[in-house]
Image (tube, grey):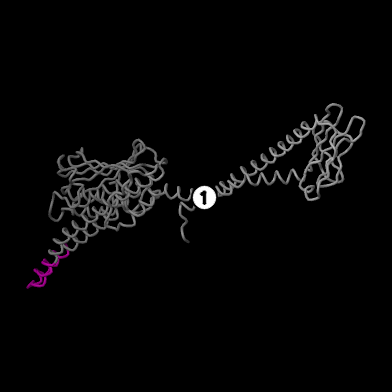
Amino acid sequence: MKATSIRARLLLSLLPLFLLAEAVVGTITYRYVLHESHALFDYHLEQMALSLRDQGEVPAPPVPPEERQQFDFVVQIWNADGSKVYISQARSRARLPDRATLGFADVVTEGERWRVYSLLARGRVIQIGQPYLVRERIAAAAALRSLTPLLVIAPLGALASWWLGGLALKPVVRVTRELRRRDARRLDPVPDEGLPAEIEPMVRQLNGLLDRLRHAFAAQRAFVADAAHELRTPLAALKLQAGLLGRARDDQARSEALQTLRSGIDRATHLIDQLLTLARSEPEAVASAEPVDLAAIAREAVSELRAIAESQGVRLELRAPGALPLTGEPEALHGLVRNLVDNAIRHTPEGSQVEIALAVDGGEATLTVDDEGPGIPAEDRERVFDRFFSRTSGDRGGSGLGLAIVRAIVERHGGGIALGDSPRGGLRVSVRLPASEAAAPARSPSPRS
């Protein structure tokens, strides 16, 4: 369906109001002119009577029939004894009553309605009459002539409204043309100078969206470039390890090369998984939030990592309330807990412990992970959130994406993350997320080892 322009909608909405105003003004004007016309006719009757009061006996002169049709008044003058002094010959032979009511009166004679003015002067009664039919015809013609300007103004007003509407919408047309000339590569702000107050907020929001898209595309390009750079090394290592496996001369060398190849494949798989998780965890990614239990998610994530921790001689301890409800994305929150615990396991020496604690503090859900590793110097604590930044290397070294993923998930849920010194001597990661109203403070969380 073709969209209707604002200009047409404005005109269509104003046209009925304009026509209604014209009708009201026309009706009032028509009635006013009718009333004024009748008042003027009454004035003429009165002036005619006053002009005849000083006259003597006036004989009725003969009037040709064609002139008689043009004379719209009847004049009667009689003495106090009832004798006629003067009778005019009007367009009709209708006679006014012999008895008169002084002043103005409405009289019906021979089925015709008359407006009559009677005056007593010097013992004579002067009576002037005019048919209502004639009065209304002349008055209606005058009233209709008074409506002619309104009939001329109506189309001119519609044209003026159309032109003024287009003039007022020029800024919208300008913004539309500016956007039509752009493509996906032009994300610079739209000029917002001289815009009306109704359009300026929309353009500002549009510029905000373009700015967010520009940053998102820049981050995406940087992510793709970094990912390509980071994948190049493990893929080259896999190629080299496959070559070593092919050149192995005995079973022992072949077994060692195969084990090395499997470890390389595991590291490459972990890196790809981390990249995909980071892409899904970006704040710009689209996903739906739902009520979740962070305590249950944490138990599941810790349970999945317990075997890995035990294989590296690390003990996991989880302290959490029975339930910790909040609104979020289950998979993203599961990845948050898993990455924090996995990061702690990788940097904790053998025979030590990683402690995970959940609680509610001031309407926020708090998640803290403490390890006994070397920690992170204060000057590097902001850099570790950058993609692919890693302070360790080797088999237990990470991909440099774990904390970047965690921060993306936290920002996506409207929370905060901070790094500090752990009471256990290593690193403490503290995450704060908005908790649901149903979440109650955890008084005495029971440890789970």
Overall secondary structure of the magenta section: helix
Q: Residue furthest top?
A: 122
Assign a secondary structure to mark 1. Answer: helix
For badge 1, the amino acid type reads: Ala
Q: Residues within 10 Å of mark 1 (few under 14, many from 20)?
A: some
Q: Mark yes or no: residue 302 visible.
A: no
Would you name the residue on which mark 1 appears? Answer: 158
Percent coordinates x, y for residue 333 in the rendering: 32, 50
Q: Is 103 located above or below residue 302 in the figure?
A: above
Percent coordinates x, y for residue 49 in the rendering: 78, 33
Q: Residue at x 84, y 39 (%)?
A: 107
Q: Residue at x 27, y 49 (%)?
A: 408
Percent coordinates x, y for residue 321 in the rendering: 35, 42
Range drawn in magenta: 239-263
Q: Nearer the viewer, residue 397 or 423?
A: 397
Magenta region includes residue 101: no
Q: Is residue 172 left or right of residue 306?
A: right
Q: Mark yes or no: residue 425 visible.
A: yes
Q: Quadrant of residue 355?
A: top left
Q: Nearer the viewer, residue 303 or 147?
A: 147
Q: Quadrant of residue 266?
A: bottom left
Magenta region includes residue 259: yes
Percent coordinates x, y for residue 189 in the rendering: 29, 49
Q: Residue at x 60, y 47 (%)?
A: 148
Q: Quadrant of residue 246?
A: bottom left
Q: Nearer the viewer, residue 50 or 203?
A: 50
